[in-house]
Amino acid sequence: MQDTALSALITALPQPVLVVDAEGFVQAASPAALDLFGQRILGAQIRAHLRQPEVSAMLERVLAGKLEDSAGFILHSGSRETLWSLIARRSETGLIVLSFNDVSDLEAAEAQRRDFVANVSHELRSPLTVLSGFVETLQGPAGEDAETRREFLEIMAGQAARMSGLVADLLSLSRVEAVEKIRPRTPVSIDMVLKATLAALRPQIDAASIRLNYDVPEDLPDIPGDHDQLVQVFQNLIENGVKYGASGGRLDVSAILQPALPGFDGPAIRVSIRDYGEGIDPIFIPRLTERFYRVDKARSRDSGGTGLGLAIVKHILSRHRGRLIIRSAPGEGARFEAVLPCN
Ligand SMILES: Nc1ncnc2c1ncn2[C@@H]1O[C@H](COP(=O)(O)OP(=O)(O)O)[C@@H](O)[C@H]1O
Ligand SMILES: [Mg+2]
């Protein structure tokens, strides 16, 4: 290949690539490689620049004649750390091509997946432990006593319910994630969604002695959406208001049409669920939509919570090209707003 063709090729490469001669001196670098290592890499000895043991050992093997090899490479720049997979290939002429692939995102996704599996296992294990403990007790002499049996079976039913709640939330999370890229387009009335949700939650609202204020204009335009998923959104937000905000004795459910909002192309409906309970310390707010995140684990669990509700809410809203806004301060209740674009 001619020099101009070679340099055209190397300039066009989107990833960092270095060409090294048989002695280890850098002969050419793609623009991304220059970004990564700076201009001074040209003509420099590669051994001096890639000094991590795994990479050095790999380089020596290839410089000694091995045709192809690879190694992981960690690059520190400022406070950021990126992970690269480095592949080295030796050509017939003795030149060695080193190409770098950024695997930081892959690595992060992998770590997230591991965390998720560990969390799920942990969440399922505790009710299972309780269940098997009680089964064992009931198999012994304690099982003969009718009163004990009744009491234990009630606890066991509670633990089984907790496990099915968790499995149901996990399934709906994975279902939402599977269709997240496909925006739903059926016209949906927010007023009807909210009324259906509130009808289902009425018993819980009454049991917590919460006064409900409902303020939704009847002439709101329909929005493109998925009725059942939106019910799921407001079910969790209202249920949270009831569970964690009951001490305020009041819950406001309202909606307004906003002609313009930063970040939205056209009008949007802003639905607000406001409670007057204990509120949330602002330092926890950014983490609330993480899977399994709960400010007070024991309390969430006692009320049948899984910590997945707001993660599901966030995914459903993102599928609707909408947004979740959370505002709260300790002692002042919490306001959860779902903003949904009208077109
Ligand atoms: N209205 C609220 N007031 C105070 N804390 C809240 C409110 N809504 C949510 N939270 C906090 O956010 C956490 C996560 O909520 P969510 O994802 O719905 O999980 P769950 O309700 O299953 O615990 C809750 O455990 C609670 O600590
Ligand atoms: Mg919840």
Image (cartoon, rainbow, N blue to C red):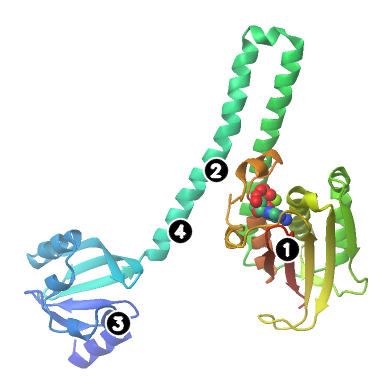
Kind of residue indicated by mark 2: Val
In primary-sequence order, the first of circles 1 and 2 is 2
Q: Are marks 2 and 3 in contact (CB under 8 Å)?
A: no
In primary-sequence order, the first of circles 3 and 1 is 3
Q: What residue is drawn where x is 78% and y is 62%?
A: 273
For disc 3, the marked residue is 35
Q: Disc 3 versus disc 1: distance between alpha carbons?
A: 43 Å
Q: Secondary structure at mark 3?
A: helix
Q: What residue is drawn where x is 88% and y is 74%?
A: 220
Kind of residue indicated by mark 4: Ala
Mark 1 is surrounded, within 10 Å at the Cα level, by few (under 14), some (14 to 19) or many (20 or more) other residues, namely: many
For disc 1, the marked residue is 336
In primary-sequence order, the first of circles 2 and 3 is 3
Q: Secondary structure at mark 4?
A: helix
Picture coordinates of residue 115, whole percent (x, y)? 47, 49
For disc 4, the marked residue is 109
Disc ID at residue 120: 2
Q: How many numbered circles are shown? A: 4
Picture coordinates of residue 6, whole percent (x, y)? 22, 87
